[in-house]
Amino acid sequence: MRVSQMFIPTLREVPAEAEIASHKLMLRAGLMRKLASGIYSFLPLGYRTFRKVEQIIREEMDRAGAQELIMSALLPAEVYQASGRWDVFGPEMFRLKDRHNRDFCLGPTHEEIFTETVRNETRSYRSLPMTLYQIQTKYRDERRPRFGVMRSREFVMKDAYSFDRDEAGLDISYKKMYEAYCRSFDRCGLDYIVVDADTGAMGGSGSQEFMVKSEIGEAVIAFCEACGYAANDEKAQCVPDHSHKDDCCSAEMPVEKVATPDVRTIEELMNFFKCSSKEFAKTLIYKADGKIVAAMVRGDRELNETKLQNHLGCIELEMADAETVSSITGAAVGFAGPVGLKVELVADLEVAEMKNFVVGANETGYHLKNVNINRDFKASAVIDLRNIVEGDPCPKCGAPVKVAHGIEVGHIFKLGTKYSDALNCVYLDENGKENPMVMGCYGIGVNRTMAAVIEQNNDDNGIIWPMSVAPYHVTVVPVNTTDSLQMEIAEKIYSELQASGVEVILDDRNERPGVKFKDMDLIGIPVRITVGKKAGEGIVEYKLRKAGEVKEFTVEEAIAQAKKEVYSALGK
RNA sequence: CGGGGUGUGGCUCAGCUUGGUAGAGCGUCUGGUUCGGGACCAGAAGGCCGGAGGUUCGAAUCCUCUCACUCCGACCA
């Protein structure tokens, strides 16, 4: 295609709404435009890359034996009502009514629909195992759409569902998907890490997330370079720190009540007591499905709500409001403590290691000193409750872990029989006996994957597409379009590459060379062949977007090199 | 959902405090000079200043309401 004819509305300036590299670049390079908060249109260049990402995923799913189908985005309420998720989703779900006033929604995810479809059509053990997938648009009315296409309200997801006879079968299906995911993300040129994830309220026997390491990632991951352990922070286990065990003050001292007017936060306490935040224990009051519970972590730690939620087995967990806190503790917020508290109390492992620490006195303006677990209060459970932090010992090997942010591009999940039980999706075994199918579900965010590729592959000048997902492989840039010799050579390179199956564009715009170079760098075409001054000698310039240095080739050499470059990168 | 910020031509923004009938740069169009990293000259088009109401002789500017976008937080199968 000739650039003069193409719809590539590049921007010189960064639109004010964009914060992160991929969002800025997707707008500047003319890949997409915003329609409303969290809703985007893909323009031709962006859509080419989008389809390439999609196609890579499709090929790898097919290779793994999964079968593609497509379901409607517009779904009747009944299916979600049957699984109970019509209410669970709440305002996240886009809901609408048809002319008969029947409830519909725009599908936020499709577990129910797949389960129902398979239930209705499949009865025999002979049909299993089976994995189905679709690449389809999802709708979620996110509270806070963010970062362009990273967290949007309309997005395309590849979602796959496996149906097996038993757990052993699920393990095999799951492993195939794991491998397909690795291959997909490898082919997209992503640097990613697979982490153990929390299965949470979904139940199930295991779950992993594919994370692209990036500072802008919303997920926190802990990983160990020594043994390869990696987990989402919701899941990462914290090993208690025993280093305080042998401290000088190991003898339990008598409790002292200390007046601490207006000293509420950990920081204020540190100043008041002149000691480190490790000498305090925080008591946090939560509402778990309406029931009040207290949770304790060391003063310098953050409570991990997922861990608490899993322990309590509750659906909804939120911090209690100030009113509830004072009615439970009898004191203003900031003075809660475990001693004499009349609600269930869960303590972090570390709290059990602490001696003679400071807690709130459940009386406004007072704290208690020299408090000890078991002597002064009892916890209903002592479990891992806190967030892991950089340098904590790895739960597998003990080496210090690293903590990084990640973009979740894929999630694979062993569902077990949660949905098949709920929706009665069963098969008949050899003995004619009914068994629930054992399911797995597997998702990849296509738009998000595309954005993650940009996030990892860019510089000050723009995007640096890996060949596999570049909208075009090669761009031919005649420096001066009024020079007929330059144009002639450029046309020749263009048509020969095109004939060889290389996706090539010709920047025939009558613009100054600087404008064309800037634009081509911005849109990130991997190979640039510049036809300039030395056209008369049959010499052109050859430059890779990612490398920077310019090589001089004859026209034939340049064509051959470009073909080689493209073919080898695509594994042809 | 709580707290902040911003809405002025396609993009980036000024003007608002102290009301007087809308500006710059970039982009676009025309003509010309140019042609190796976002050129120059000349000319032109394009905005009921997010919307509604109010105050006023007069509102982009002040007041009220509302909508949208955005950031921080909470939340996130």
Image (cartoon, coloured by chain):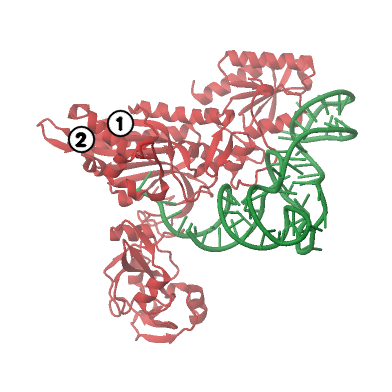
Chain colours: A red, B green
Which quarter of the picture shows residue A306?
Answer: bottom left
Along the viewing direction, whichever of A109 and A163 lies nearer the viewer: A109
Residue type highlighted by circle 1: Thr
- Picture coordinates of residue A226, whole percent (x, y): 42, 50
Which quarter of the picture shows residue A247?
Answer: bottom left
Report the side of A296 relative to A570 (left or right): left
Q: What is the secondary structure assignment of the residue under circle 1? A: strand
Q: Is residue A154 above or below residue A232?
A: above
Judge the density around disc 1: few (<14), some (14-19), many (≥20) Cα neighbours within 10 Å.
many
Report the side of A63 relative to A506 (left or right): left
Q: Quick one: quadrant of the N terminus of chain A?
A: top right
Q: Which residue is mark 2?
A: A165
Q: What's the residue at 38%, 86% (across, down)?
A: A256
Subunit that carries the residue with mark 2: A
Along the viewing direction, whichever of B65 and A12 lies nearer the viewer: B65
Residue type highlighted by circle 2: Arg
Subunit that carries the residue with mark 1: A
Residue A131 got which mark?
1
